Amino acid sequence: MKRALFALALAASWLLLLAWAAGVDWHSPLTPATQRMLAGSQFTSVFGQGSMRDGRLHVESTAEDFSSLQSVGLPNLDAREFAILRYRFADFPRTLELSLVFRTAEAPEDVQTISLPWPGTGESSFDLSRVDKWRGTIVEIGFAQFATGQVVPPELGFRPFDLVGAQLWSPSWRGDIGALMTDWLGAWPWSQRSVHALGREGDTPRAQSAVLVAALAAGLAIAWAALLLGLRGQRLLAATVVCVALAWVALDVRWQAGLVQRLLATRTLYAGLDWPQRSRIVGDSDILQAADEVRQILQDEPANSRILVDAGSGYEWLRLAWHLLPLNVAGYPLARVFGASLPENCLLVFYDNDTWRTDPDIRKLLANSQRVTSAASIHTSGFEGGRVVVFRFHHAH
Amino acid sequence: MRTEYLLAWLVPIVVGGGFCWLAGARQRRGGEVASAIGMGWIGGVFIAAFALHRFARADTVHALANAWPWLAALGALGWGAGIASGLRARSPGADRAMPERGAWARLLWWVLLALILTRLLLLADEASLRPLFPWDAWSAWAVKSKTWMLLGHAEPYVSISRWLANPVAPTRSMATWNYPELLPWLQVWFASGAGGWNEPLVNLAWCGALAAFALAAYGYWRNFGLRPSLAIALVYLLVSLPLIDAHVALAGYADLWVAVALGLATLAWTRWMLHRERGQWLLAVAFALCLPAIKHEGAIWLLAFSVVVALDLLPSHWRRIVAAAIVLLIIVGLLLGGFVLPMLGLGWVHVAWGSVSIPTIGRFDLAWHPVGGAMLASLFTLPNWHLLWYLLPLLVALRWRALVRDHVARMLCLFLLLQLAFLFVLFFFTDAAAWANDFTSANRLILQIVPCVFVFAAVLLREGGAARAFRSRASGISRGLLRPISPA
């Protein structure tokens, strides 16, 4: 009798815990009262090219910037009424990141984007009620894809896939718990934040913490064991150890599954290649190409020439400096405080950055400097052309 | 695979393992081979990196080929001395490690070993495939090593002003030019073995660091008196921590190396406190001294370590007096406008009411920053640590009596409290609060002390017999350094 009561209390409390974690509205039905079904064939390719196949949208290629977008117009859909998004893809490559995009009637120019986990092969769910901007009347939704940021070179990310379809559900227990499962078990790619704090890789609103829920689930089991089974002393300690161990293993299985998914994505890019080939496959392949261009331009310079690089962002100039090694390179932002006290003949490299012609201080600094071009080229592609611009610094005489 | 790359992995075991074997030669209790190989590998890698820093600046490409015979000879001396010393001191049957009981425990041991190996293989696979990925790895830690390997020799890194002032000098510069150089030289060691700059093969060293620490920890915990299944369970818990795994898979940051060096220093120091083996005390000090050579905050951990080690050496009745005197001196120093503190790797640190000035880093203004929510989220809700921070207070509550009575547990607790106090001041009173709020460096600094947390947990989990055996000989601690207490 005690054991049956324990099992009942444990099951009930865990169910309530799960419902709390999923953000279930207690008044909502078990299954959605209203659904909007959107077959893949209803979507149209906005960026990239696609074709209809068996009710699906077969996405064949990307736009010029290697992104793709499929969308569908919705006739005045009330956001509050449809808070659960369900979506399904087939053959979705591991090298692409998936985002949901939508627009509202209230702000039709304002396109909202939400990162979603890799969709895999099954059906995935997302709870849109966690998204602040999912309010008012939705007039269009779509799915965007692009190579995983900072991980996959944009030109290598895409492979053809099918958009099978999407659904919008009214709130229900099934929908909320499905969204929770996708959040907890979905595959997220590595990001620069992964070495700082896992679970905070993107700005996507996330569900309740699985770690907290696992701890509470273990705590509930221990509490019921003490209250209903009357465990004390060594027996309660043993029960505690078992509960905590199971909770830990559950969390670890989830983490290890995520590691495997990430490894499979990494293998897609790098398996079977030797190091020289792999070293060319980087998320910032455009900066790597710029570094090649700079090397070409500076190939006749003395090996120890001081080179200062600048770019549109800290990430870009740091990456450019990294790719240029072992050239004697440092960041111009570090040297800027020294004004014109730069060494004669030092080289200034501007990547994807027009401050050399728009920033008055830098224009003044470069007033007596000389533009350097590749020995292989007769002319630069116009004074303002090219993503890489190099100057040899000269002081005023 | 190149023979040299294999040597890059094996020579550290020979070099460091010899000294670790020597340090434990007097009293063998079990887990000795595991701890000598695990700790030896990390120690050997550090020795190799120091040796390269001193002797390989002119030829980095052949650094390993030139250095390994000398290092291997040094290691052979260590092993020889260890074996000879062990033969002289051997007392068969004395203080053997706690054996395993029951078939279920043995089965559990094998299951956990399989889980640990699976995890390490998974991480090694990831690390061996991708180019260097995390931000600080390519913007700071690997810049020097990549440059030196591609150049074929090492050029010094200087401040940007010096670099610009003398444009013909063979110098280099970057924002983090003054970061410690043990890690870059460690990378040169593996790159030299690989035959050139090969990021995945260099990055595999991070997996080696975790595996070696796991092996060392297992050996030490067996030595402390833990049963094999409990020792390997703790190893599994450590290896399964997601943020540690992320630092291995996305290798390149220095935090894991700080964590293992600090963890090894704590393991050896704990063994010294338990068994009074001078060799272990020296190992602990050696690993602690490596900390500032890895990363700036290593100097803080070294300071905290020095305080607890010094307190441990004092006679028990002096400890409270000295601790109170230190606190009093700090208060008086602050009231008088501040005081300076010499810190290895950081220089003369000026501590005043409202600010701390560190020559190599800068000035930190002290003011309250409410980052409790972000810190709690980092520890208790984000998937960085599984249930570690829930379990630690639970374990302390359950083993409270052991903590109160056991000198070793108390000293480790004090060490942890000092570390946590530093992190508390750093995140709640300085601008580093931003690192907590944006979930960046806060967890990485916590990662550095996690191995110490596990050593503390292992000591709390020692069975009563082992704890009682020690308590009976725990008074008058300082005499141990001069007169080791023999077993039995």
Image (spheres, coloured by chain):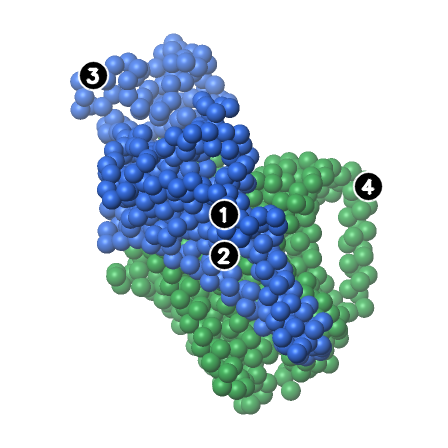
Chain colours: A blue, B green
Q: Residue A152: which quarter of the image?
A: top left
Look at discs 3 and 2 and give the one toward the viewer: 2
Q: Amino acid at mark 3?
A: His
Badge 1: residue crowd in 10 Å (few <14, some 14–19, many ≥20)? some
Q: Amino acid at mark 1?
A: Pro
Q: Position of residue B120 (x, y in %)?
A: 41, 63
Depth order, front residue of B118/B144 = B118
Q: Give the labeled residue for mark 4.
A: B335
Q: Residue at x 32, y 36 (%)?
A: A42
Depth order, front residue of B482/B309 = B309
Q: Position of residue B244 (x, y in %)?
A: 49, 56
Along the polypeptide, which appears first: circle 1 or circle 3?
1
Q: Are marks 1 and 3 in contact (CB under 8 Å)?
A: no
Measure the C-alpha gap from mark 1 to mark 4.
Answer: 67 Å
Q: Give the labeled residue for mark 1.
A: A32
Q: Which mark is residue B242?
A: 2
Q: Residue at x 78, y 60 (%)?
A: B322
Q: Which mark is residue A243?
A: none
Q: Give the labeled residue for mark 3.
A: A379
Look at discs 3 and 4 and give the one toward the viewer: 3
Measure the C-alpha gap from mark 1 to mark 2.
Answer: 36 Å
> Could you tell me which chain the residue with mark 4 belongs to?
B
Q: Quadrant of the C terminus of chain A?
A: top left
Q: Amino acid at mark 2?
A: Pro
* B423 vs B11: above or below: above
Q: Residue at x 66, y 42 (%)?
A: B371
